[in-house]
Amino acid sequence: MEESLSLEDEQKEEKLYLPKMIKLESLKKSDHFKHVLTGKKFHTNLYSIFATKNFLKSKKNRLFISFVTKKKIGNAVKRNKIRRKLKAITMKILKIKGAININYTYIIICKTKSYTEKYDKIFLEMQKSFKKLN
Protein backbone atom coordinates (compact mmCIF):
# COMPACT_ATOMS: atom_id res chain seq x y z
CA MET A 1 0.00 0.00 0.00
CA GLU A 2 2.87 2.38 0.75
CA GLU A 3 4.39 1.68 -2.68
CA SER A 4 1.19 2.69 -4.47
CA LEU A 5 1.07 5.97 -2.55
CA SER A 6 4.66 6.82 -3.44
CA LEU A 7 3.99 6.09 -7.14
CA GLU A 8 1.01 8.44 -7.14
CA ASP A 9 3.06 11.14 -5.42
CA GLU A 10 5.81 10.78 -8.02
CA GLN A 11 3.31 11.08 -10.86
CA LYS A 12 1.85 14.26 -9.35
CA GLU A 13 5.34 15.76 -9.03
CA GLU A 14 6.17 14.90 -12.64
CA LYS A 15 3.05 16.72 -13.86
CA LEU A 16 4.14 19.86 -12.03
CA TYR A 17 7.48 20.01 -13.85
CA LEU A 18 6.26 19.27 -17.38
CA PRO A 19 6.88 22.25 -19.69
CA LYS A 20 4.19 23.68 -21.94
CA MET A 21 3.77 21.77 -25.15
CA ILE A 22 6.21 23.01 -27.77
CA LYS A 23 5.19 22.60 -31.37
CA LEU A 24 7.76 21.71 -34.00
CA GLU A 25 7.50 23.81 -37.13
CA SER A 26 9.54 23.14 -40.25
CA LEU A 27 11.16 25.63 -42.58
CA LYS A 28 9.40 26.20 -45.90
CA LYS A 29 11.48 28.51 -48.09
CA SER A 30 14.86 27.76 -49.62
CA ASP A 31 16.18 31.16 -48.47
CA HIS A 32 15.49 30.14 -44.88
CA PHE A 33 17.40 26.88 -45.39
CA LYS A 34 20.36 28.75 -46.92
CA HIS A 35 20.43 31.17 -44.00
CA VAL A 36 20.47 28.39 -41.39
CA LEU A 37 23.13 26.39 -43.26
CA THR A 38 25.57 29.31 -42.89
CA GLY A 39 25.32 29.23 -39.07
CA LYS A 40 26.79 26.95 -36.41
CA LYS A 41 27.50 23.35 -37.41
CA PHE A 42 27.89 20.07 -35.56
CA HIS A 43 28.60 16.78 -37.36
CA THR A 44 28.36 13.18 -36.16
CA ASN A 45 28.26 9.81 -37.90
CA LEU A 46 24.48 9.73 -37.48
CA TYR A 47 23.43 13.27 -38.47
CA SER A 48 24.55 16.89 -38.90
CA ILE A 49 22.96 19.80 -37.06
CA PHE A 50 22.97 23.38 -38.30
CA ALA A 51 21.72 26.23 -36.09
CA THR A 52 21.23 30.00 -36.19
CA LYS A 53 19.40 32.49 -34.01
CA ASN A 54 15.71 32.83 -34.84
CA PHE A 55 15.20 35.17 -37.77
CA LEU A 56 11.53 34.27 -38.30
CA LYS A 57 8.65 35.79 -36.39
CA SER A 58 6.89 33.08 -34.45
CA LYS A 59 4.30 32.52 -31.81
CA LYS A 60 5.27 31.34 -28.36
CA ASN A 61 6.16 27.68 -27.82
CA ARG A 62 7.34 27.10 -31.42
CA LEU A 63 10.62 25.49 -32.39
CA PHE A 64 11.69 25.88 -36.00
CA ILE A 65 13.39 22.62 -36.92
CA SER A 66 13.60 20.69 -40.19
CA PHE A 67 14.66 17.10 -40.75
CA VAL A 68 16.28 16.41 -44.12
CA THR A 69 17.28 13.10 -45.68
CA LYS A 70 19.04 12.60 -49.00
CA LYS A 71 17.47 10.45 -51.68
CA LYS A 72 20.61 8.29 -51.75
CA ILE A 73 19.75 6.85 -48.31
CA GLY A 74 17.10 4.46 -49.61
CA ASN A 75 13.45 4.31 -50.46
CA ALA A 76 10.81 6.63 -48.98
CA VAL A 77 9.90 4.19 -46.22
CA LYS A 78 13.47 4.11 -44.91
CA ARG A 79 13.89 7.89 -45.12
CA ASN A 80 10.60 8.52 -43.30
CA LYS A 81 11.50 6.06 -40.56
CA ILE A 82 14.78 7.90 -39.95
CA ARG A 83 12.95 11.25 -39.80
CA ARG A 84 10.31 9.91 -37.41
CA LYS A 85 12.98 8.45 -35.12
CA LEU A 86 14.94 11.71 -34.96
CA LYS A 87 11.76 13.76 -34.49
CA ALA A 88 10.70 11.55 -31.57
CA ILE A 89 14.13 11.92 -29.98
CA THR A 90 13.93 15.70 -30.39
CA MET A 91 10.52 15.80 -28.71
CA LYS A 92 11.91 13.74 -25.81
CA ILE A 93 14.92 16.07 -25.45
CA LEU A 94 12.59 19.10 -25.46
CA LYS A 95 11.03 17.84 -22.22
CA ILE A 96 14.41 18.18 -20.51
CA LYS A 97 14.65 21.74 -19.23
CA GLY A 98 17.30 23.79 -21.05
CA ALA A 99 18.44 20.99 -23.37
CA ILE A 100 17.32 22.70 -26.60
CA ASN A 101 17.34 26.46 -27.04
CA ILE A 102 13.99 27.51 -28.53
CA ASN A 103 15.49 30.82 -29.65
CA TYR A 104 17.39 28.99 -32.42
CA THR A 105 16.34 27.57 -35.78
CA TYR A 106 17.72 24.10 -36.55
CA ILE A 107 18.21 21.85 -39.57
CA ILE A 108 19.08 18.21 -38.94
CA ILE A 109 20.47 16.34 -41.94
CA CYS A 110 20.09 12.60 -41.41
CA LYS A 111 22.68 10.03 -42.45
CA THR A 112 22.32 6.35 -43.37
CA LYS A 113 23.79 5.03 -40.14
CA SER A 114 20.95 6.52 -38.08
CA TYR A 115 18.59 3.93 -39.62
CA THR A 116 20.39 0.95 -38.07
CA GLU A 117 21.52 2.60 -34.82
CA LYS A 118 19.65 2.03 -31.55
CA TYR A 119 17.26 4.71 -30.27
CA ASP A 120 19.06 5.08 -26.91
CA LYS A 121 22.46 5.68 -28.49
CA ILE A 122 21.07 8.32 -30.85
CA PHE A 123 19.25 9.97 -27.93
CA LEU A 124 22.46 10.35 -25.89
CA GLU A 125 24.43 11.54 -28.91
CA MET A 126 21.79 14.11 -29.84
CA GLN A 127 21.54 15.40 -26.28
CA LYS A 128 25.31 16.05 -26.25
CA SER A 129 25.09 17.73 -29.65
CA PHE A 130 22.44 20.21 -28.58
CA LYS A 131 24.41 21.04 -25.42
CA LYS A 132 27.51 21.82 -27.49
CA LEU A 133 25.53 24.02 -29.89
CA ASN A 134 24.01 26.11 -27.09
Image: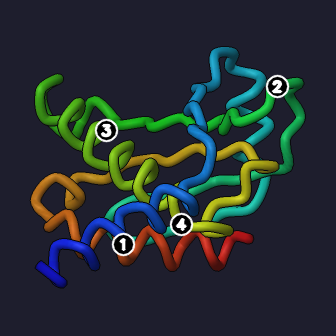
What secondary structure is found at the residue carrying circle 4? loop
Closest to the camera, between mark 4 and mark 3, is: 4
For badge 4, the amino acid type reads Ile
Looking at the image, do the residues carrying marks 4 and 3 touch, with CB atoms under 8 Å apart?
no
Q: Which numbered dot is residue 58?
A: 2
Q: Residue at x 53, y 66 (%)?
A: 96
Specify which label sits upstream in the sequence, 1 or 4: 1
Q: Find residue 86 and report its horizontal and vertical position in percent.
A: 34, 49
**Crowd band around label 3 with a 10 angstrom C-alpha radius: few (<14), some (14–19), many (20+):** many
Closer to the observer: label 3 or label 1?
1
Closer to viewer: mark 2 or mark 1? 1
Secondary structure of the residue carrying tag 2 is loop
Residue at the spot of label 1:
10
Tell me the distance, in whole angstroms, between the alpha carbons under discs 1 and 4. 17 Å
Q: Earlier in the sequence, mark 3 or mark 1?
A: 1
Earlier in the chain: of badge 2 and badge 4, it is 2
**Gap in Å between the C-alphas at discs 2 and 3?**
23 Å
As drawn, the residue found furthest toward the top would be: 29
Q: Which amino acid does the dot numbered 3 rest on?
A: Arg
Which residue is labeled 3 in the image? 83
Q: CA distance from mark 2 to mark 4?
A: 22 Å
| Three-letter code for the amino acid on which mark 1 is drawn | Glu
- How far apart, in angstroms, are the residues tagged by discs 2 and 1? 35 Å
Amino acid type at circle 2 is: Ser
Viewer-closest of 92 and 126: 92
Q: Which quarter of the image is occupied by the C terminus?
A: bottom right
In which quadrant is the N terminus drawn? bottom left
Residue 96 tag number: 4
Residue 99: quarter of image: bottom right
Label 2 with label 3: CB-CB less than 8 Å: no
| Residue in view at x 24 percent, y 36 percent | 72
